[in-house]
Image (cartoon, rainbow, N blue to C red):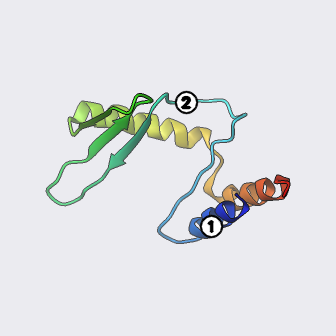
Amino acid sequence: MREQYEEIARLASLDNVTVQVLPQGMRGYLYEHDFSILILGGKLPTTVQADTAYGTASITDRPREVGRFSRQFEALSRSALPPEDTPKFLHQLSREITA
C-alpha cells in the first residue's frame, strides 16, 4: 500500500493531474455510486457514466443529467482536502502503515 501512496503523490505532482483526497472523517456531500464525467471535446457532448453497487452502468449525455453530476462533483471537490494538501496527507498515511 505504501508504494501506491507514493505513486499517487508522484502523479499529483504532475502539471496536468489534480488529486484530492476525501478523508473518511470529513463531512460534506457523499455520493452512493461511482461516476465519471467524460469531457470529450470537439463535437462530442460531455457524457456521464454512473456505476452502481450491483454492477449496472448508466450512460447519458443529456444536459440536465450532466449538469446534475457536475454539481455533485463540485460538491465532492469542496468537501475534499485541497490538492496542495494531498502529498502531505498521503505521506502521513504511509507512515501509519505497519509493515
Nearer the camera: disc 1 or disc 2: 1
Q: Position of residue 75 (x, y in %)?
A: 51, 36
Q: Nearer the viewer, residue 23 or 41?
A: 23
Task: Give me the residue at 47% from left, 40% from top.
Answer: 74
Left or right of residue 7, residue 90 in this image: right
Q: Look at the image and tell me in which quarter the C terminus lies.
A: bottom right
Q: Quadrant of residue 66?
A: top left
Q: Is residue 90 left or right of residue 95?
A: left
* Residue in the picture at 19% in, 48% down: 45
Report x, y in % for residue 25: 73, 34
* Disc 2 crowd, CA 10 A, few/some/many (<14, 14-19, 20+): few
Direction from residue 46 to residue 72 in the image, left or right: right
Residue at position x 18%, y 60% from top? 42
Name the mark on residue 30. Answer: 2
**Residue kind at label 2, given as amino acid type:** Leu
Query: Is residue 54 shown above or below 3?
Result: above
Mark 1 belongs to which amino acid?
Glu
Quadrant (top left/top right/bottom left/bottom right) for the N terminus: bottom right
Crowding at mark 1 (Cα within 10 Å: few <14, some 14-19, many 20+): few
The residue that label 1 is drawn on is 7
